[in-house]
Image (cartoon, rainbow, N blue to C red):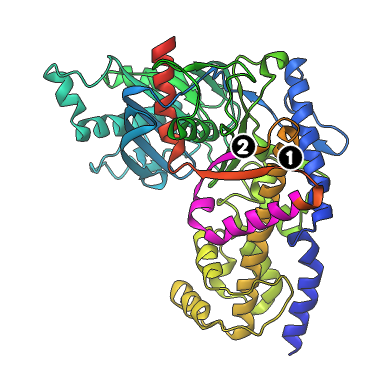
Amino acid sequence: MEEENQAKMLFDLYEEYFFLSNLKLLELVDDFHKSLEDGLENHRNRLKIDKYYSNYKPFKMLDSCVDRLPTGKEKGVYYAIDMGGTNLRCVRVNLLGNGQSETKFKKVKFSEMKVSSTGKVVNGNKISKIDQEVNIFDKTVSSETMFNSIAVFFNEFLDECGDLNDLTNGNNVGNLPLEVGFTFSFPIVQSKIASAKLVIWTKEIETGRLTDDPVEGKDIGNLLNLAFKRNGIPAQCKCVLNDTVGTLISAMYDLNINNCDNNHSLKVNFPNNISENQPLIGIVVGTGVNACYLEPNSSNFGYKGVIINTECGDFYSTKLPITDCDYSMDWFSDNRGEQIFEKMISGTYLGEISRLLIINFLKNKTPEIFFQKNSLKTEHIAKIISHFNDNHQKYNQNHDLKSIENYLKETFSSNFDHNSTYIIAKISQMVLMRAASLVSAIIAAFFKRFNKTRNQITIAIDGSVWTKIPKFQKYVKDSLSSLIQESGYLGSIHFYESDDGSGRGAAILASTTVNTH
């Protein structure tokens, strides 16, 4: 009973940091909205993107250089390479028009992509004992080696699709060189649609940092094209985009609602040719967190494109509900002090936040495995919460926890009593609910921006946290509904789940650049 009372007291201390009130969230909505507007002004005035204000940090508000939107009528075979934080995906999209398409893809986990210390791509071939394998995200791996590895995997995909054989035999599978869109889910600054420099690695990636051939500061579109050339691959990068932009573009094609009389992409002219049902916002909640949106006045702020990549994962405000566990996790991360907001939401970090909280609660009763960094993953949290039927935010151990207890025992090879099991389940709920509430606040800030001119907002959304954790979706929608009602906004919000949209969107965007540029 004493242990339970101590846990209850600690829970009471943390409660306001994880179960966020509408008042707290509306304060954050205001900061998000100001951050968005100040980020636009910074871009107009060409101010430094890392400028801080007194109590918050504006969004970076990066230019996507996308000035044409798909109509849903585009046709042809196009390709994409989708580089997220967990997987590398190669995509082949056959656009059939009328919002229809056929998609093939191949993916590999980055954790499985190895190169030798001398820069050779390892494809199951044995290497000498002195020629050690390293992951392509290791700081000792050069940009050339990393992009060679990506190009080789893409070439294997083309071969498996039969496209290389078709080209050899003179069959026409598309234009030559093959048009490729490159989804790159990291902060990039673009000067044109196919040219983008990596600002900084995030998601614990460090490729090139200990070499004289880094990736940061380089044009990744050019790096990919050079890798194609070195490896004799008949392909060319036609566009570079963030995963949120890909998600939004994919939804636009699927919904097939842009007004256009021909098969070509739509030159944007706000507000006359933007449908009420047009998706305006693209959000990805997965390994990382980010959002983009269609900005009606983009040209007034000095943008070449109409889709703005907010890089909201880098947001900071003194009003964020940051705890000792957040500070501890950030301290031991590879990008200390950066992406604070993302670290409170993304799948890379939710398990680690939960692990640190569990240690705080269980103390000397913490299973030994939980003292290992990253031993608790977000997928574990998702499984635990799927069996947790507590719909209340208050601390109450009167629950049947047998299924969770069995899962913990099987997964971590340790015994868990009722008290420990409840604490772990409750912490899982706390961490997910805070993340969901923060996502709802971002959406509410966009809603605030568009609400004066539109009665309906459609959001294209993707990412593993969103798609693989149903309760996370529920938490976001519940929090958003409460926020909208509290704020007195009118209108409705619709979610369109853009399944694997980031890669498909890159291929679709490649089709618009081919048709128009």
Q: Can you give x and y, in whole percent of width and height, for residue 451 in the image? A: 73, 36
Evaluate whether residue 188 shows in this view. Answer: yes
Q: Can you give x and y, in whole percent of width and height, for residue 156 in the image? A: 25, 33
Q: Of callouts 1 and 2, which one flags the residue occurring earlier in the amino acid sequence?
A: 2
Nearest the camera: 477 or 509?
A: 477
Q: Can you give x and y, in whole percent of width and height, for residue 273 in the image? A: 57, 20
Would residue 54 appear left or right of 4 to someone viewing this image?
right
As drawn, the label of residue 445 is 1
Question: Where is residue 360, by image quadrant?
Answer: bottom right
Q: Can you give x and y, in whole percent of width and height, for residue 19 in the image? A: 74, 62
Query: Looking at the picture, does residue 275 appear above or below residue 117?
Result: above
Work out which quarter of the rendered image holds the C terminus and state it.
Answer: top left
Residue at the spot 53% in from the left edge and 47% down from the top edge: 286
Work out which quarter of the rendered image holds the N terminus and state it.
Answer: bottom right
Residue at the spot 75% in from the left edge and 27% down from the top edge: 39
As drawn, the label of residue 291 is 2
Evaluate whether residue 336 shows in this view. Answer: no
Q: Secondary structure at mark 2?
A: strand
Confirm or deny contact between disc 1 and disc 2 (CB under 8 A): no
The magenta span reads: 458-484
Q: Secondary structure at mark 1?
A: helix
